[in-house]
Amino acid sequence: MNILKPPPVGEDDELNFLEIKKSELIGIIRPRIDDIFIEIRYMLEKCGYRNNSFRRVVITGGACQLGGIKEFAENQLSSKVRIARPKIIKDLPESFSGPSFSTSIGLLEYAINEHFINNDKKAFLSKNKKFSFTKIGDWLRQNF
């Protein structure tokens, strides 16, 4: 029997660790994952992708790091599944290239690209010669 001891959210005191059986945790997480993939399947069908009319589904995010999630997703969606990671960005630590940072990195890239679309890229770079992901990387390191 595996016992896990996760600390309560926001607690640093090692005396307050909770004890939970791995099987109990799985019993909590598994139904939520089932619900998520039922909803994904419904949305794919609603969008016109009926029973294997799509070749591959790409998933990303922190939950795709759960053990066996790729095989579970393939079974639930009756399709091949690929786990995606964000592109590595210069000046950000490699640890931010994991699937759990996909949304954050995607939003950063979107914001920068939107700025470049709405403004002249050369003018932006000449005004901001020190612009890089260094400041963003520093902020992520401090807050995560």
Image (cartoon, rainbow, N blue to C red):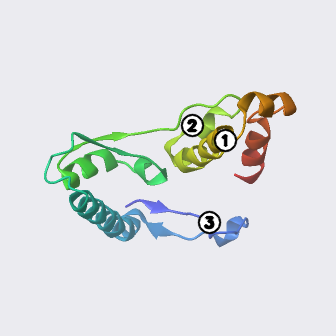
Residue 108 visible at all: yes
Q: Quick one: which residue is furthest to the left in this view?
A: 51
- What residue lies at 53% left-to-right and 40% top-to-bottom? 98
From mark 3 to mark 1, how far is it between C-alphas? 37 Å
Q: Earlier in the sequence, mark 1 or mark 2?
A: 2
Give 37 or 118, whichever is nearer the viewer: 118
Is 45 drawn above or below residue 9 in the view shown?
Answer: above
Q: CA distance from mark 1 to mark 2?
A: 18 Å
Of badges 3 and 1, the one in the foreground is 1
Q: Is residue 20 above or below residue 57?
A: below
Q: Which residue is disc 1 drawn over? A: 112
The residue wearing badge 3 is 7
Q: Which residue is mark 2?
A: 97
Residue kind at label 3, given as amino acid type: Pro
Residue type at tag 2? Ser
**Which picture quadrant has residue 87?**
top right
Near-viewer residue (141 or 2): 141
Q: Amino acid at mark 1?
A: Ile
Residue 61 vertical position relative to residue 41 in the rendered view, above or below: above
Which quarter of the figure has residue 136?
Answer: top right
* Picture coordinates of residue 138, whole percent (x, y): 78, 42
Within-10-Å neighbours for mark 2: few <14, some 14–19, many 20+ = some
Left or right placement of residue 41 versus residue 1 in this view = left
